[in-house]
Amino acid sequence: MSEQQPQPNRGPSDLQVIGFVVILSFVCALVLAVLASALRVPQEVAQELDRSEQMMIAARVFTHEGYFQIQNDKGEYVPAKYAGDGRLVAGTEEDIATSNEILDVYKHRFIPTLVDGKGKTETFKEAGIDEEKYLADYKKSGYYRQPEKLIYKILPNPTNGKGEDPQPIGYVIPVNGFGLWDAIYGYLAVEPDGETVIGISWYEQKETPGLGANIAEESWQKEFYGKKIFQPNSEGQINQKTAPVGITVVKGKVAEVLGTSPKAEAAVDGMPGATLTGNGVTNAYRDVLAAYRPFFIKIHDKTETQ
Amino acid sequence: MSKPTAVSYFKEQLWHSNQILVAILGICSALGITNRLSVAITMGLSVTFVTACSSFFVSLLRNVTPDSVRMITQLAIISVFVTIIDQFLKAYMFPLSKVMSVFVGLIITNCLVMGRAESMAKNVTPFPAFMDGLGAGAGYMIVICAVGAIREFFGFGQLLGHQIVPQSWYATTDAPFGYENFALMVSPPAAFFILGGFIWIYNIISGEDHP
């Protein structure tokens, strides 16, 4: 380079520089576009699988460790393994489920259903709504804001004999709200009494790793087992028509903040260093569950009269 | 000094110019996502892939890249490879990609990658540039895997998700003086201390070479 004489017009002209950048951008864009379209299908499959897993974690049919769960005679959750046709039998923690097994159990036991403003349920077919379009269109704005709200029936573990229509053993409600950084999406499963929580999960969140992101961890989600979604009054009674709905994430430990107050039944421990994420979770449950109140009253009355 | 061979470019990066221990680059991700060994390995492989490939292409284009837009060119090339990695993780390793979240995208701004493109790749031919990038990535990977292994072992009592510390050692209500996981190890500051320790040890070992 040093041998060349310095010339006023050395190096590429502006036009050449622009041309280079244009070509480079074009090639990069082309590579990425081809890649994105080639990987779209596997990505959607992976997301679908993850959502199914998370819903099953909320319903305690599946665990973070990767094995299925069933309830034994005493009602305790024990490890299970897949036995064909969506059926689960007792197994061990070593029985890690494959993705096909997960999707099959999901297909057999989780039935998307719609609930109207009065708490009446109907299938997508009865309502004349296209399921795929509905699921895709209203995920961001929240299904709870729709006149026809989304709910998943959890069917019991299929038995060998072909009985009549099985009664749901619970319902999964899609929950969404805002965490500290971005929207958070999750599931909450309630028992048929319409007030006791089976479990929860969060499948999409961008909270701070190590702090707010703990909402996706099993250790924190365990806090919700057996909690109430309605706040009991001072006598410990729940009046579903008037009681405040939602689960409160307190700042600190429930035992220290609320003591033995009946309110503790509808509250969980906060995560240290993640107060704002906790508030986001509290608000999400309050807003979403309020929309489903007529439905909870309806299924609660049904179990009372039985 | 004799003409360096391609392999020497690789070796140089592994130890003598290790990007984390000597140049103190790439610290952000080294602190952020090394609390599990599996995540550290994935991150290490991703960075190695990006550094090696982007160095190769930066070097390939070095004679036609106008000097005024060379940074933008390097960034464009790097981002293409980062996006490729990101898309692949989302398609085939979804649970891991959820854990790594923003850190994959942040490889673009990892100073280590651009540092290699700017200080080495644009001055040498493609193959040595590739080897140099590969070495830089491998050097980075070894360090973050070591940090990840230490943090997972002490923080969770596990390695790659398998329990190493026997469950029977742990403190229970019956035996309150048993073993407990070291909670600090799970949080990012732990990586800071461990890295500091590594750099100290490195300087002791290589003290003669770097007066």
Image (cartoon, coloured by chain):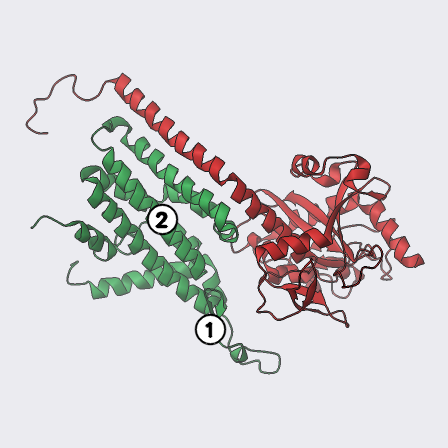
Identify the residue at the far right of this view: A305
Asked whether, in this view, residue A305 is left or right of residue A232, the answer is right
Quarter of the picture holding the N terminus of chain A: top left
Distance (Cα) linking label 1 and label 2: 28 Å
Point 64% across, 57% down: residue: A270
Residue A232 vs residue B79, the one in the foreground: B79
Residue A161 vs residue A276, the one in the foreground: A161
Quarter of the picture holding the C terminus of chain A: bottom right
Protein chain holding label 2: B
Rendered view: A75 above or below A25: below
Residue that mark 2 sits on: B47
- Mark 2 element type: helix
Shown in red, the chain is A
Residue that mark 1 sits on: B164
Q: Where is residue B206? Give x, y as percent.
A: 20, 63
Q: Residues within 10 Å of mark 2 (few under 14, many from 20)?
A: many
Shown in green, the chain is B
Specify the amino acid type for callout 2.
Val
Specify the amino acid type for callout 1.
Ile
Answer whether residue B96 is visible to the viewer in this image. Answer: yes
Asked whether, in this view, residue B170 is left or right of residue A147, the answer is left
Q: Residues within 10 Å of mark 1 (few under 14, many from 20)?
A: few
Rendered view: A130 above or below A175: above
Q: Where is residue A253? Give x, y as percent.
A: 66, 62
N-terminal of the pair, mark 1 or mark 2, is 2
Q: Where is residue B178? Give x, y as percent.
A: 53, 80
Q: Where is residue B54? Give x, y as percent.
A: 31, 40
Residue A212 vs residue A188, the one in the foreground: A188
Mark 1–mark 2 CB contact (< 8 Å): no
Point 64% across, 46% down: residue: A185
